Image (tube, rainbow, N blue to C red):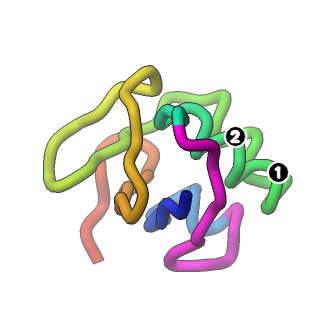
Amino acid sequence: MQVTIKCYGAARAATGRKAVEVEVADDATVGDALAALARAHPDFERCRQAELVVMRDSAHVERTDAVADGDVLSVSNPPMVED
């Protein structure tokens, strides 16, 4: 399934993109989506290991939360930066 990850702050600097679509398994979690982003953009690995704010639909999510096909996650170093 496809998950879109919007990147802000250090995550955007690491990926060079405002948004990235990643392919994940049907039983994937937020952590799996972040790992897929790190595989596609190796510079993101350092961000993934650091403290991140991850949101879906304006609500904070944990790395263990499930994702669904078509989900849009927003990722930033704290505090979440709007732009």
In the structure shown, which secondary structural element does the residue marked by tag 1 occupy?
helix
Q: Quadrant of the N terminus?
A: bottom right
User: Hey, what amino acid is under mark 2?
Assistant: Ala
Q: Is residue 25 magenta?
A: yes
Dot 2: few (<14), some (14–19), or many (≥20) neighbours within 10 Å? some
| Residue 70 located within the stretch drawn in magenta | no
Would you name the residue on which mark 1 appears?
39
Residue 34 location, quadrant: top right
Q: Residue 35: which disc?
A: 2
Label 1 with label 2: CB-CB less than 8 Å:
yes
Point out residue 72 in the picture as x, y percentages from the top left corner. Answer: 36, 62
Label 2 SS: helix
Part of the protein shown in magenta = 14-26
- Residue 2: horizontal and vertical position, in percent? 53, 63
Quarter holding the C terminus is: bottom left
Report the residue at 23% width, 37% height from top.
60
Whole-number angstrom distance, CA of label 1 to CA of label 2: 6 Å
- The residue lying at 45 percent from left, 45 percent from top is 77
Give above or below for 82 relative to 49. Answer: below
For this rendering, which residue is in front, 21 or 81? 21
